[in-house]
Structures are given as C-alpha cells and as structure tokens.
Amino acid sequence: MALLQLDNISVAYDQQYILKDFNLSLEKGQLLSLLGPSGCGKTTTLRLIAGFLDAKDGSFRFEGKDYTRTPINKRNFGLVFQSYALFPHLSVYENVAFGLRIRKVKDDEIRKRVMKMLEIVSLHGFEDRFPGALSGGQKQRVAIARALVIEPDLLLFDEPLSNLDANLRVNMRVEIRRIQQELGITTVYVSHDQEECFSISDKVAVMNKGVIEQLDHPSVIFKYPKTEFVGRFIGFNNFITFTERQADGDAVLLTVNGLPFRAKKVPGMSAGMKGAIRPDDLLAGTENEISEGPNVLDGTVKVSTYLGRSYQYIVETALGEFTVNKEMLSPFENGQRIRLLVPPEKLVLVD
Amino acid sequence: MKKRYLYMLLMPGLLFLTLFMIFPLAATVGSTLFQNGQFTFSHYTQFLTDAYFLEILGTTLLVSFMTTIICVAIGFPVAYYISKLPPRGKSILLALAIFPLLTSSVVRSFSWMIVLGKNGLINNALMGIGLIQEPLSILYTPTAMIIGLVHLFLPLILITLVGVMENINHDLVEAAQSLGASRFSAFRKIVVPLSIPGLIIGSILVFVGSLTAYTTPALLGGKQRVISTFLYQNAITLNDWNAASAIATMMMIITFVVIAIMNKAAAKFNPKG
C-alpha cells in the first residue's frame, strides 16, 4: 500500500482552483519530484502535504491514517525551504536541536543526535556559528540537518537549490540524494529544474495547471513524454501535427501534407497525432548527404548559433520551423538549403 | 567631491547641537557640582536624603515602569496582528494607531479628565449599573497618569514593533511549526526573540517619554507630583535654579541607566539581534 496518498484534492484561492481533483501516491523510501513551471501547483501540493494549506475537498492519507486535518506540528514531516529559513538568533547547534527541544528530548541525547547529524551533512565544527556567518551551501546543509534530526516520516524539499550557484547546485543535489538513500527516507522534492529532478528522483511528476501530466521514472519521461506540454518542458522543441495515422507492424505510419513519416511503436505509446523530436536527435545534412524519402524534410537555414559542443540551426521547412543541433567543423551558412532526417526511433507521439 | 569635504555637510547640525544642546547640558550639570565656588555633591545628597523627593522619585519610576509594561502588553499582540495584514489593511490600522499622536496632549488630558472624573463617564456608568455606590477616585492619582501616558505612548511602541515584525520571514514560523512547535511556541521561540530589538527601542521611547512627560502628569496627577512637575515647581515657582538643575541631571542619569539595563537585557535574549 502506498505510504502517502492524495485523493481528489482540491485547493482554491478566491474561487480560483489551483489544484482540482488532484491524485498522487508515493511508496515508502522513494524520492518523488514535482516538476513544472511556476504556477503549475507544485508548491501548493507540497504545502498541502506539509499542512500549511487546507484542502477544500478530497483527502490526504499517510500510513493508512487520515491526515487531511492533522495540524502541521503533529505531522512529523521535515521541511527544507528555498529561503533555508534558519533561525537567525540561534546557533547552528540550536537550529538543529530546535525540533528535539520541542520534543523534550534529554540534553545528552540531543547533543548526540545533533552532532551525528552535523557529521552526516559535513558540518562538523560549525555548531557554534550563527546562520549569518554561513555560505548558502552551508545554510542549506544546516536546514537539511535540522529537518532530518527529528527522524521525520517524510522529507519535503521546496526548491532547495535555487538560491545556490550552478556548481554548488550540482554538488548539493548529489549530497541530497546520498543522504536520502543512506537514511532511506521517503521524500517529496519540488523544483522547476528538470536536470535536477531527473538526476535525483525515483519518480518524477511533471505538472501543469494543477494537473499531473505524466508521472513515471525519469528515464521514461526523458525518452517518451506523453503530452506536448511535457515534451516541450523537457526539451522536445520540434513538433509535427500529422493528419493521418495507421499502425503497420511494429511501426506507425503518419502523413502530413502528403509527406510520409514512420515512427517506432513503443508500449504505452500515446494515440495522439503530434510527433515530437529533440534538436539533438534530428539529423541535418546537405542534399548530397541525405537523400529524399520518408521522414525527410527540405529546408533553409534561417538562424545559426554556436553552442560550444555543436551548432544550433533554426531551419524553415514546409512544416514550419525546426530546431536542430549538429556537431560540425564548418557550419552551414544562413540561407543554405539543407535536408532534415527524422529518425523513426526518435520520433515520439504525444497527446 | 573629495572625501574630507563631505565632513563639511555635518557642520551645520554639529554646530547647532554644540551650541544649543552640549553647552547648556554641560552648564546645567556643572552648576550642580559647585556651591560658592566650592566643589560639592551637597545638592544631590540634600535631595537623596529628602523623603518627599524620594517619594516623588518613586512615584515617577513606578508610573514610567507601569506605562512601559502596559504599552508592551497591549502593543505586542496588536503589532503582531498588524504586521500580518496585507499592505492596505496595515496602512489603515497604522494610521489609526498614530492618530492620537496628532492631537495635542493638553486636549487629550482634558478629555481624560472628563472620562475619569468623579462625575465622569466611568464613574457614572459603574454607579448606573450598581457596581459601586460611591464614585471611585481615579483622577488625580498615579493610575490616571498611567492611563493618560499609555494613551500617549502606545503608538510609539506600535510603530517600532510593526517595523521589526514585518521583517520577520514567515518561513521561520512555518519552519518552527514543521519541527513540531505549536503556533504559540513558534511565536514564543521565534517571533518574540526576533522582535526584541524593536521591543527595546519602543520600551526606551515609552519609558523616557513617561519619565519626562509634563503635561499629562500635571493635568491628570493633580497634587501628585512627578519629577518633571517637581522640577518645574523648583525652577519657576520657587526660583531655585540650582535645585532644578540637580533634578534635571538626575533625570538624565536615570534615563542612561535604564537604557543601559535594557540593552544588556536585549543582548541576553537575542545575541545576534
């Protein structure tokens, strides 16, 4: 049975629904990310689980018990905030000890647990500092230690890394994953950064307008987005809207404007009429390199930009503009006629 | 502009302060330490051994302390409430809170006389519903002074507290709650210590204000003297300027001592404040 279960939850501000009939479940020990643009309802979902928001309708069950009306301080969930929310008037030690003091744990027990937790987040020796004297990464470690020391039943992260610089972000997310797996703690993680979510999660829920568009293992979402929104969000910049579709063995035959396309059939494939492909998966070449045929489009280079590892071209075709990345020594010129090949196994059909 | 010329900007203010504040203060304090050209503490020992003066001093300190405590007790929850309001509601309530500051303290004291007097609103109401048979004497007591001073100084503590409280990140309260703190203990362990700087400044303003207030105690206190009215009496009625100067110096010393104690207390409650 699922550890955490949201059933038909609705949340509204001023008559406006942020979540409507929202469902989510999570197994013990897993790290689930809620991924989506701002305003998609991911933070609302997190705040609802934490207990800061009341659901208008629906129920929230945790370990089989009804938690819908349980006050925040009775939930025993650890929370890590985007702003870190360290208590500025307390030392690092007292910040971490806060939850234990509330629980009236004995002093020597507190000492033991706080020191062990500071060890885990690699902040040994910082216990007498005050938050004002810490760097962003150190603050976030204290926040994590403070949330973990109470041995929470669930750990909640609200965009914990977005105030850190790029290098630190990568280090910290590895750290978060390490601690989460070491302690085997069930975690809900909110972020708008897909790389961050994909790298640390067991499951990712991509959200849009208060609805989960797709919930799956990160590698499945990365390869096979189910909807156009998910596709766009994770970098499928090119879309083709087909007019005809029919099955053909382990392939799907598609047509638009009389142009034939093939796509490889995969289990659970969408029945939609839209094809999506990443700029990295699209092949580009001169008319000599790619011959005419199915899955091929003629086009003209409109814009070219240098990405470092490759060049990126915006190509004007009969089906609209396509974005394609290609590693090459001497780039195509603007206005040059080229051909685009859509590899059938890389063309993903979405709703 | 060169940096050293920037100091020139300080000159008008500095000159004004030196001429009209530092000199008079030094002259006042200096005059209390000499008698007939001889250095002496006799002005002070004379007062500090005088039972009447000590009683006035006691009343003044009591009135000031009570005013401060009541202002804090009333002001703290109100300030917290105001600081949590959306901007519009906040500015309306703050304007209402400051409104009493815009009326003259003479007018306010007279209205309190109407309310608190033997035939005043309170006594009439209490006798009307039969709670008391004889009118209470509230007017011309320290209680009346405290009521008038609380009314006068409450806005000061509200403004300073709201200023500090609205800068407390609400995430901190939520973090405390997520760690198991009830609303009340989150308030006590997070909001209160982080409000200490505002509380100290507000309390100092109220205390010093009450200690030196003249109009309100003069009108509401009747025969009951406080230091400021006693000082006025010595200077104007008895024309004893040396005594008045000694009283003024003692008022200053009390003020400094109280501020020092409060700052010490603040440092203890909020080491990083």
Image: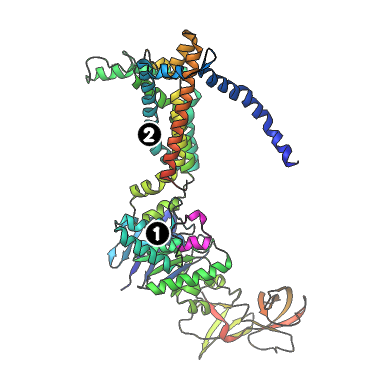
Q: Nearer the viewer, residue B48 or B69?
A: B48
| Quarter-of-image position of residue A64 | bottom left
Residue A27 is covered by the magenta coloring: no
Where does the image place residue B152, in percent across and percent down from the top left? 44, 25
Residue at the outermost bottom position: A249
Query: Do the residues bearing badges 1 and 2 touch, measured as CB atoms within 8 Å?
Result: no
Residue at the outermost front position: B38
Where does the image place residue A172, in percent across and percent down from the top left? 50, 68
Where does the image place residue B55, in percent across and percent down from the top left? 35, 19
Disc 2 target residue: B74
Image quarter in which the N terminus of chain A is found: bottom left
SS state under label 1: helix
Magenta stretch bounds: A127-141
Q: Nearer the viewer, residue B19 or B31?
A: B31
Residue A136 is covered by the magenta coloring: yes
Disc 1 target residue: A96
Give the alpha-carbon distance from disc 1 to disc 2, as whole Å.
33 Å
Give the residue type at disc 1.
Val
